[in-house]
């Protein structure tokens, strides 16, 4: 009978851990939704992405390629699969890896689309000034 007490204790601990993990995950999602603002790196550029045949894509009408392990986040900051977005014109912020492949992509929501100006080329990003706290760019 000692075995049953250990099992009941193990089940209780397992339920507690599961409940804690669920509450933590729910609160993290709720916090992102309440904040309403995603923080983009200073290296993020704005462009129109159209995924043709993954990993092939068009960025601002020019041929581009998704990097292996590229991360695409939708308007609610959830991971999206490139195949599910194929053929759709998407206004995005994106970063490039060291080989020029598209590494990180954020599909913009209404509030993020309204945030202007945002650089669309690396030369603009080098000339403009980025305020990471406000997530805004200013031209010199």
Image (cartoon, rainbow, N blue to C red):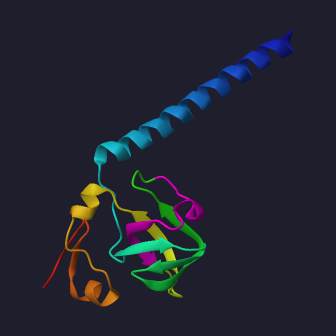
Task: Locate residue 77: give its quadrant.
Answer: bottom left
Residue 89 is a magenta residue? yes
Q: Nearer the viewer, residue 134 or 78?
A: 78
Query: Which quarter shows the N terminus?
Result: top right
Q: Which of 31 and 17 is in front in this view?
A: 31
Q: Residue furthest front?
A: 87
Q: Nearer the viewer, residue 1 or 125?
A: 125
Please report the bounds of the magenta region as a residue range.
78-95
Residue 116 at x, y percent in the picture: 20, 70
Residue 32, relative to residue 46: is it above or below?
A: above
Q: Which residue lies furthest to the left in this view?
A: 140
The tally of labels here is 0
Q: In this view, does 81 lie to the left or right of 96?
A: right
Q: Can residue 133 be seen in this view?
A: no
Residue 118 at x, y percent in the picture: 25, 74
Residue 48 at x, y percent in the picture: 38, 74
At 41% from the left edge and 64% from the top edge, which residue is drawn? 106
At 45% from the left edge and 68% from the top edge, which residue is drawn? 105
Residue 26 is a magenta residue? no
At 54% from the left edge and 88% from the top edge, which residue is drawn? 99
Q: Is residue 96 left or right of residue 10?
A: left
Q: Which residue lies furthest to the bottom in this view?
A: 123
Q: Is residue 7 left or right of residue 132?
A: right
Residue 65 at x, y percent in the picture: 55, 81
Q: Can residue 14 be seen in this view?
A: yes
Q: Nearer the viewer, residue 51 or 42?
A: 51
């Amino acid at each position: 009978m000692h075995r049953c007490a250990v099992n009941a204790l193990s089940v209780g601990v397992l339920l507690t851990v599961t409940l804690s993990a669920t509450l933590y995950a729910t609160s993290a999602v709720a916090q992102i939704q309440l904040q309403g603002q995603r923080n983009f790196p200073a290296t993020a550029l704005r462009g129109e992405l159209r995924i043709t045949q993954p990993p092939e894509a068009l960025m601002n009408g020019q041929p581009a390629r998704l990097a292996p392990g590229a991360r695409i986040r939708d308007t609610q900051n959830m991971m999206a699969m490139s195949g599910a977005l194929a053929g759709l014109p998407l206004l995005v912020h994106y970063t490039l890896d060291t080989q020029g492949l598209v590494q990180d992509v954020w599909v913009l929501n209404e509030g993020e689309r309204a945030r202007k100006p945002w650089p669309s080329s690396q030369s603009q990003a080098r000339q403009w000034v980025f305020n990471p706290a406000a997530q805004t760019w200013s031209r010199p």
